[in-house]
Image (cartoon, rainbow, N blue to C red):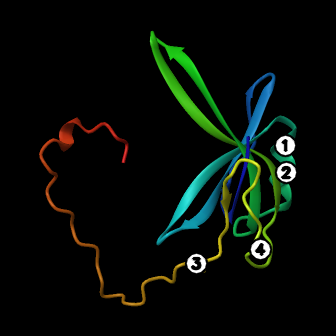
Amino acid sequence: MAYDATGRLHEIFDEQQVSEKFRKREFVLEVIDGQYPEHIKFQLVQDKTALIDQYKVGDEVKVTFNLRGRGFNKNGQMLYFTNLEAWKLEPASGGASGGGASAGGYNQQQAAPRPVANQNQNLRAQPSAAPIAGDDDNDLPF
């Protein structure tokens, strides 16, 4: 199942030789989704690791990828992980082309301009309120 996303390259990592038969290279794409940017990590595997060599941080690219998931048993407990496995990178088009969804039904276009940094330097983040009762048992990582 193929998906695509368009955004700005935020970070590019070095290639990793995971095992004798498996190598990967990861990168982070900054995608504007609503008010705040999303930083989405993709991986290139095997012979695809060099696809990102022609790009640099800050470039606008369109990434075509597959959604991959696997489970593994660790000490009797099943754990699962998900990867976004990129297999095609190309420069983003100059403007929002009215193209439809890709074969997978997901097409992320970056039509909105990047948010402008806050102009008022006097604004400061306010400390958050005390946690609501029951937050201690919340096991979400964010």
Estimate the spatial distance between the alpha carbons at disc 3 and disc 4, rounded to whole Å. Answer: 18 Å
Give x and y (percent) for residue 107.
68, 59
Q: 127 above or below 24? A: below
Estimate the spatial distance between the alpha carbons at disc 4 and disc 2, rounded to whole Å. Answer: 23 Å
Cβ–Cβ below 8 Å for labels 3 and 4? Answer: no
> Can you tell which quarter of the image residue 67 is in?
top right
Left or right relative to 82: residue 76 = left
Residue ID for mark 3? 114
Give x and y (percent) for residue 134.
15, 41
In primary-sequence order, the first of circles 4 and 2 is 2
Residue ID for mark 2? 51
In primary-sequence order, the first of circles 3 and 4 is 4
Estimate the spatial distance between the alpha carbons at disc 4 and disc 1, rounded to whole Å. Answer: 26 Å
> Can you tell which quarter of the image residue 127 is in?
bottom left
Residue ID for mark 1? 48
Estimate the spatial distance between the alpha carbons at disc 2 and disc 3, rounded to whole Å. Answer: 26 Å
Q: Callout 4, which amino acid?
A: Ser
Residue at image point 80% right, 72% down = 93
Cβ–Cβ below 8 Å for labels 2 and 3? Answer: no
Residue neighbourhood size for the residue with mark 4, other residues' Cα within 10 Å, grouped as few (<14), some (14–19), many (≥20): few
Left or right relative to 131: residue 17 = right
In primary-sequence order, the first of circles 2 and 3 is 2
Q: Considering depth in this image, is 10 or 31 the residue closer to the camera? A: 31
**Label 2 SS:** helix
Left or right relative to 37: residue 99 = right
Estimate the spatial distance between the alpha carbons at disc 3 and disc 1, rounded to whole Å. Answer: 29 Å
- Nearest to the eye among marks 4 and 2: give it: 4
Cβ–Cβ below 8 Å for labels 2 and 1? Answer: yes
**Label 3 SS:** loop
